[in-house]
Amino acid sequence: MSKRIGIFGGSFNPIHIGHLVIAEAAWQEFGLEKVLFIPSGDTPNKDMHHIDKHLRYNMVQKAIEGNEHFDISPIEREREGPSYTVDTIRLLRTSLSHDCQIFFICGTDAIVDLPNWKYNKELLDSCDFIAASRPGSEIQLEESIRFFGETGIKKIHPLNTPELDISSTKLRELIANKKSARYFIPDNVLTYIKKYHLYEA
Ligand SMILES: Nc1ncnc2c1ncn2[C@@H]1O[C@H](COP(=O)(O)OP(=O)(O)OP(=O)(O)O)[C@@H](O)[C@H]1O
Ligand SMILES: O=C(O)c1ccc[n+]([C@@H]2O[C@H](COP(=O)([O-])O)[C@@H](O)[C@H]2O)c1
């Protein structure tokens, strides 16, 4: 069997257990050799208050500590301009053997948005997608898969894992309202958030 690697791109603002659970499930279900987390530099199509890319990167690094099949890459952090996935996959391809299969891990909300991504058809030709179900995106998900025709059906794979209704937005709100985010966010990441007073109102 050819080598399979998982790529998990995200803003991770901040990283939470929803991210970690789907990365682990994708690794297991799809027989991935590893999952490479790629925190975005400047996330396309996201008009939000991103904290500094270096801080988001450091939090991901802390969150994956101790998991021997998780790794992190600074390629988007170090690239100027919007972090388009098509550019990232193209760049990664140059350092991988050509029979290596790339699986981009995401939530179903990202698949719903995929027709708006840069060079989305080229992107879907260059990698498979593993989509973890997220509440609220069921109907549009079918439409989005159909947008890509046969390729969509063949290359967008559902991830069989319990739905977790958790988002970075909700966690930023909890922290801003001085509520506990314990257990939603790994302890060492929460310590980092507290140390630098991140997301406080
Ligand atoms: N609870 C979740 N279940 C399934 N997928 C998720 C979940 N949380 C995030 N993802 C997916 O992980 C990827 C990175 O997500 P991101 O870092 O934007 O987190 P988020 O929680 O969606 O953030 P925000 O609330 O700031 O939009 C995206 O593909 C997103 O769909
Ligand atoms: O390439 C694109 O056009 C594109 C548009 C929107 C999002 N993405 C990528 O999708 C991943 C998840 O994005 P987000 O907004 O959920 O953090 C992250 O790696 C983004 O760089 C990519």
Image (cartoon, rainbow, N blue to C red):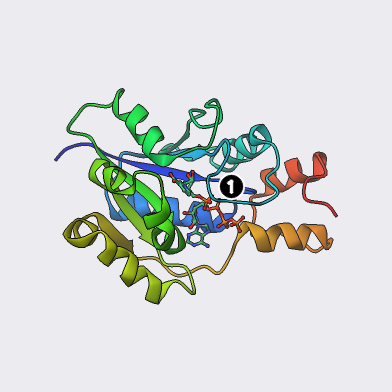
Residue 80 rendering spot, x and y as whole percentages? 55, 27
The residue nearer to you, when weighing 1 against 129, is 129
Residue 85 rendering spot, x and y as whole percentages? 41, 40
Q: Ligand 1 near label 1 (Cβ, under 8 Å)?
A: yes
Residue 1 rendering spot, x and y as whole percentages? 14, 40
Q: Image height check: is 164 above or below 85?
A: below
Residue situated furthest left in the rendering: 1
The residue located at (83%, 52%) in the rendering is 200
Residue of label 1? 12
Residue 181 placement, left or right of 47: right
Residue 156 placement, left or right of 109: left
Q: Image height check: is 80 above or below 159?
A: above
The residue located at (30%, 56%) in the rendering is 29
Q: Amino acid at mark 1?
A: Phe
Q: Badge 1: few (under 14), some or many (20 or more) residues near its Cα, within 10 Å?
A: many
The residue located at (32%, 70%) in the rendering is 143
Q: Image height check: is 173 above or below 96?
A: below
- SS label for mark 1: loop
Residue 181 placement, left or right of 197: left
Which of the 4 quarters of the picture holds residue 151?
A: bottom left
Instruction: Name the image quarter holding the C terminus.
Output: bottom right
The residue nearer to you, when weighing 139 against 131, is 139
